[in-house]
Each structure stands twice: as C-alpha cells, then as structure tokens.
C-alpha cells in the first residue's frame, strides 16, 4: 500500500503513460509509487506488501530497486516540471523520463513491516538528463542507496 503523497507527479502523467508496474496509477496490480516534493528533496513513501518478502521479516531487494528506479524518474519529472515554471496540480502536463541507468547499493537488510521512504536529491547533468541520488529508509535505518540517470522521454517513444 502506498502512503498518500500530496501532489504526486504520477497523478499528472497522461493515461497512455500511466501503466508502469512501479509507478503507474492505472496499473492496479503494480506498486503505484507516488513521488512529490518534501522541501528541496523528493520523497516516495511505500508500505511493502507480504508478497515482497525475501526471507521472513525482510523485503525483497527487487522491490527496493524498483522503488529507487521509479522514484528517480518521478524526481526528474518533478525537477524539470518546476524548472519549466510548473508544479503538480497546476494542470500543466509534466515531462516524462525513462531510466538511462540504475545503480543500487544495499546497505542493511530492509525490515518487512515498516513503511519505506525514498528521499532524493536531483542534479541536472544535461538539459535532457538528470541524476537522482536516493536513500531508502525503513524507520531511521538507511537500507539502500541508489543513483538513477533519467533521460527525457522522446515524443516518439511508444508510438
């Protein structure tokens, strides 16, 4: 179950681009990650489900990688949307990003029954590419760190 993030960027994506297993709001079997601003950083909050178990009591690493991946592309979208003078909820369609690279470092085992919070810092590295540095916490424990290079999705993508 995904905790509510006010003004999540994924809520603004057009229906054609809202089916991602990680962050697609229209994918009822997916995670439906939602990413928003928390001051100058980005945040995604997610409660792992029982089926996300690696070994009893701990979260499967693939879920963590998916969280970092979608948090990264959502954060890039937030950053460019803001740079373009917009915010989620203002009616302007945000840019969409795809993952150019994903790096995940598992720091500590991730406990199962704790909401996960991904916090991101956005770095623009090119007019069409952003690097997102993410840390994933379970309570006060930093469980994983990641880096996503997100590339602006071309208009012809998926057509």
Image (tube, rainbow, N blue to C red):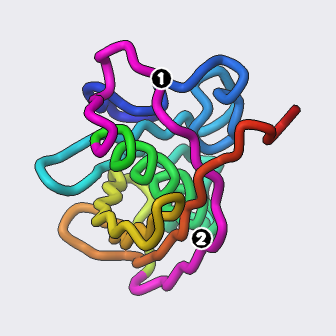
Q: Name the residue under label 1.
A: 93
Tag 1 secondary structure: loop
Q: Which of marks 2 and 1 is nearer the N terminus?
A: 2
Q: Name the residue under label 2.
A: 61
**Mark 1 Cα-neighbour bin, 10 Å: few <14, some 14–19, many ≥20:** some
Please check the rendered image and state whether residue 102 is part of the magenta-colored stretch, yes or no: yes
Residue at the spot x=47%, y=68% of the render? 126
| In the foreground, 10 or 28 | 10
Quadrant housing the C terminus: top right
Decide if residue 104 is in sight here. yes
Residue 139 position within the rendered picture, expressed as x and y whole percent measured from the top left: 23, 61
Q: Which residue lies furthest to the top in this view?
A: 91
Write the start and end of the magenta stretch as one range.
83-108
Which quarter of the figure has residue 88? top left
Residue 6 position within the rendered picture, expressed as x and y whole percent measured from the top left: 25, 26
Label 2, label 1: how far apart the Cα atoms are: 32 Å
Q: Disc 2, disc 1: CB below 8 Å? A: no
């Amino acid at each position: 179950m995904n905790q509510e993030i006010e003004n999540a960027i994924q809520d603004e994506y057009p229906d054609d681009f809202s089916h991602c297993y990680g962050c697609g709001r229209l994918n009822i079997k997916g995670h439906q990650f939602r990413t928003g601003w928390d001051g100058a950083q980005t945040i995604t909050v997610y409660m792992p489900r029982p089926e996300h178990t690696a070994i009893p009591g701990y979260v499967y690493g693939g879920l963590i990688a998916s969280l970092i991946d979608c948090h990264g592309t959502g954060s890039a979208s937030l950053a460019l949307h803001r740079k373009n003078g917009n915010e989620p909820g203002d009616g302007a369609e945000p840019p969409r990003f795809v993952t150019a690279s994903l790096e995940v470092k598992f720091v500590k085992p991730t406990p199962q029954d704790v909401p996960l919070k991904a916090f991101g810092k956005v770095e623009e590295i090119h007019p069409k590419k952003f690097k997102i540095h993410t840390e994933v916490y379970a309570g006060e424990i930093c469980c994983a760190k990641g880096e996503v290079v997100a590339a602006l999705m071309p208009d012809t993508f998926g057509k």
